[in-house]
């Protein structure tokens, strides 16, 4: 593959730093919001399981790869998030695909947020039914789309939870109000899990997660600092996934040591999650306050991420240079549904120091008038 098609190679050398190229730069990228991948308890769990269990079961769970740690993890996830059942998937991306394969034959229409992550759009295609989109985070547009499906429809609504680019959340309570009783709402909360909710249960924390129409998919590779994904919902859905999901039956599951790491991360969130989330939110506000005069609504967005694009290529290069001069890795990316073809995404963690946050805030302040 030509080098121009790939982003720069990065090596993370501390919880908040990367090496690029030959320099130590402060890192505001990725989605390891609590840096649990560096946490002593998580790393110790991974190391111990690697020594005792090996790195790979080398077979589908539906054949000879059904290691007992996967069932242990599923029980822990179901308990933590308050759902009747969970099914662990090989990756976070395949969690929504596994879920939709489980719903084959039960859904007549798919209604998807127009700016949904590509995993949700790929999941919609697997059902082979009519798919329509609705305007991003717009309950009125969702209602119109649902009405167009017909009175006897059994629609499946697909949406992200916490946006990884904007730091916003959809009005899920309003979505449930317009969703028919025969409908389902699948929320892929890859970025909200751990970071949001009184107990770190994400955007569904509270009464909404008890609605039987609500399904949750998530990843363990972000705030949990490990790897893999999961589908959470009623027991019948898990059972259908076991029999109807080719992705589940044909995939080798995540390595047992990473399942052990997720179990340890859940334990960290149970014991230290309140302080971690408080520190994360304090760090987020410390940076976002620079936007108060021009974008006051950003301070009320609950997520630890935000994205900025520059008005022209010249200022983009100057912003990139200013970040490097300040010792910050310039997180210039190209990603679907971003604010521009190329933009800078910043992810704040609970582990960034005051001096690191101050350095970023100073650079942002210099270019505040140049952001789209």
Image (tube, rainbow, N blue to C red):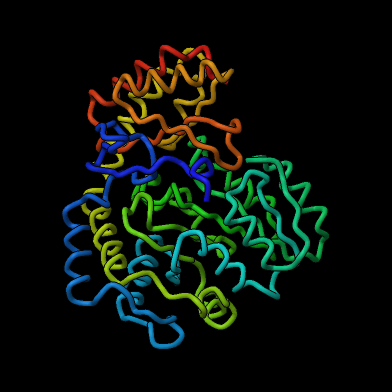
Q: Is residue 199 shown left or right of residue 133?
A: left
Q: Nearer the viewer, residue 283 or 201?
A: 283
Looking at the image, is 161 positioned above or below residue 249?
Answer: above
Which residue is the extreme one toward the front?
2
Measuring from the top left, give residue 315's x and y in whole percent.
Answer: 51, 16
Q: Is residue 124 shown left or right of residue 147?
A: left
- Residue at image position (40%, 63%) is 228
Measuring from the top left, give residue 229's x and y in whole percent.
Answer: 43, 63
Measuring from the top left, give residue 278's x and y in whole percent.
Answer: 29, 37
Q: Nearer the viewer, residue 245 or 178?
A: 245
Check the picture and name the quadrant holding the C terminus.
Answer: top right
Q: Nearer the viewer, residue 17 or 227?
A: 17
- Residue at image position (31%, 30%) is 283
| Count of marks, rendered view | 0
- Residue at image position (24%, 61%) is 264
User: Quarter-wise, where is residue 127 in the image?
Assistant: bottom right
Q: Is residue 13 shown left or right of residue 129?
A: left
Which residue is the extreme one toward the bottom?
63
Measuring from the top left, give residue 31's x and y in whole percent.
Answer: 39, 44
Q: Nearer the viewer, residue 154 or 112?
A: 112
Looking at the image, is 116 positioned above or below residue 41?
Answer: above
Looking at the image, is 363 positioned above or below residue 352?
Answer: above
């Amino acid at each position: 593959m030509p080098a121009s098609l790939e982003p720069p190679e990065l090596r993370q050398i501390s919880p908040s730093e990367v090496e690029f190229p030959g320099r130590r730069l402060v890192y505001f990228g990725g989605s390891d919001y609590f840096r649990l991948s560096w946490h002593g308890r998580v790393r110790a769990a991974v190391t111990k399981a690697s020594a005792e269990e090996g790195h790979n079961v080398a077979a589908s769970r539906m054949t000879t790869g059904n290691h007992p740690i996967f069932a242990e993890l599923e029980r822990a996830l179901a308990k933590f998030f308050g759902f009747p059942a969970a099914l662990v998937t090989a990756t976070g991306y395949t969690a929504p695909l596994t879920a939709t394969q489980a719903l084959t034959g039960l859904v007549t229409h798919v209604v998807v947020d127009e700016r949904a992550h590509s995993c949700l759009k790929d999941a919609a295609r697997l059902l082979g039914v009519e798919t329509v989109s609705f305007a991003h985070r717009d309950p009125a547009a969702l209602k119109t789309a649902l009405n167009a499906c017909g009175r006897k429809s059994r629609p499946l609504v697909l949406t992200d939870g916490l946006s990884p680019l904007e730091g916003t959340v959809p009005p899920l309570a309003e979505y449930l109000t317009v969703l028919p009783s025969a409908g389902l709402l699948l929320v892929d909360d890859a970025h909200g899990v751990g970071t949001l909710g009184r107990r770190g249960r994400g955007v569904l924390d509270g009464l909404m997660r008890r609605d039987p129409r609500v399904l949750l998919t998530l990843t363990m590779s972000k705030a949990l600092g490990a790897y893999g994904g999961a589908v959470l919902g009623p027991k019948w859905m898990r059972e259908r996934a076991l029999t109807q999901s080719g992705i589940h039956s044909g995939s080798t599951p995540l390595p047992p040591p990473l399942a052990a790491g997720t179990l340890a991360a859940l334990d960290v969130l149970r014991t230290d999650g309140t302080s971690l989330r408080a520190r994360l939110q304090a760090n987020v506000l410390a940076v976002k306050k620079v936007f108060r005069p021009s974008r006051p609504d950003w301070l009320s967005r609950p997520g630890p991420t935000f994205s900025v694009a520059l008005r022209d290529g010249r200022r983009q290069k100057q912003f990139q240079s200013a970040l490097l001069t300040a010792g910050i890795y310039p997180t210039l990316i190209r990603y679907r549904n971003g604010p521009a073809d190329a933009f800078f995404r910043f992810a704040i963690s609970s582990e960034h120091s005051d001096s690191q946050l101050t350095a970023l805030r100073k650079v942002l302040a210099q270019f505040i008038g140049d952001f789209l």
